[in-house]
Image (spheres, rainbow, N blue to C red):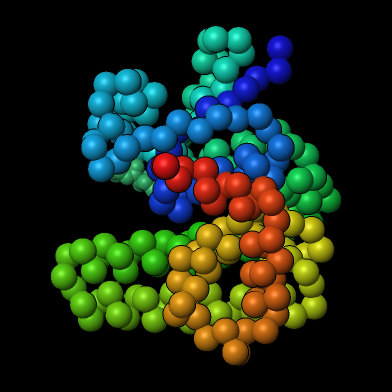
Amino acid sequence: MEATYELFGAPPGNCIRAAIALEEAGLPYTVRFVDLAAGEHKDAPHLALNPAGKVPVLVAREGNKPSFVITQSNAIIFYVAEKSPGRLLPEEMRSRAVAYERYFFFLTDVIAVGHAAFTLKRAGAKDGYALLTERMLATLATAERYLENQQYMAGDSFSIADIAAFTIAGSVKTHLPWPTLPAMRRWYEQIAARPAVAHGLQAFDVE
Ligand SMILES: N[C@@H](CCC(=O)N[C@@H](CS)C(=O)NCC(=O)O)C(=O)O
């Protein structure tokens, strides 16, 4: 029996990346909005799925039975990529290694730094926040070089590297020096126009 999927989540980037991956993979899934503000992620039904009390969580179902539960947005994204050969990762091994390289560049050198900056902001550490934000934006801008001679972040096909890059670029859109980033601007508009990306971005919008 073919599995169907439920993605438990909320609007922050970790969940949005997982939703875009499912959309781009074309896997059948439904969204289960978890109200973080109301503390729903700390309630017993959610803790039964993820004892860490976090989102996203992906539940695979065969019939009515959950057959598989996985947490951690990046584990979800890789699982989804493997379920949809060629759609989120190149099949050729070296091209795939480049996609990993770029994906982890955005994840560890840009997104993680952005998360650290946000934590400092919440702690009132203004100088640290400014320093890490500046570093994150400068590092993100270096991705211009990936796009000078190719259409996507990791070559000639869309990949998980584009998902990571697009969500972080979108969240700091108004702070990027776009006049100096012509290739990234072209790429950003092209990724934003993908229907699967647009659907994934709105996955956790509540009416
Ligand atoms: N490394 C985890 C981070 C998960 C995470 O921190 N999720 C946030 C939302 S983006 C969350 O559940 N926050 C609620 C909390 O920590 O109480 C992942 O990538 O899935």
- Picture coordinates of residue 86, whole percent (x, y): 79, 45
Question: Which residue is found at the position 69% from the left and 61% from the top?
Answer: 193
Question: Which residue is found at the position 58% from the left and 47% from the top?
Answer: 200
Question: Which residue is found at the position 21% from the left and 77% from the top?
Answer: 126
Q: Give the camera-side residue of 150 and 171.
A: 171
Q: Which of the 4 image quadrants contains residue 123?
A: bottom left
Q: Which of the 4 image quadrants contains residue 161?
A: bottom right
Q: Give the camera-side residue of 189 and 137.
A: 189
Quarter of the image where ligand 1 sits: top left
Q: Residue furthest top?
A: 64
Q: Residue furthest bottom?
A: 180
**Can residue 171 be spotted in the picture?**
yes
Q: Give the camera-side residue of 35 and 65.
A: 35
Q: How many marks?
A: 0
Q: Is residue 12 above or below residue 83?
A: below
Q: Which of the 4 image quadrants contains residue 87?
A: top right
Residue 79 placement, left or right of 36: right
- Picture coordinates of residue 39, whole percent (x, y): 24, 36
- Picture coordinates of residue 158, whole percent (x, y): 74, 57
Question: Which residue is found at the position 51% from the left and 66% from the top?
Answer: 170
Q: Is residue 159 above or below residue 66?
A: below
Q: Residue furthest front?
A: 207
Q: Is residue 44 above or below residue 40?
A: above
- Picture coordinates of residue 120, whole percent (x, y): 24, 67
Q: In the rendered view of the protein, which quadrant contains the N terminus?
A: top right
**Can residue 97 be spotted in the picture?**
no
Q: In the rendered view of the protein, which quadrant contains the C terminus?
A: top left
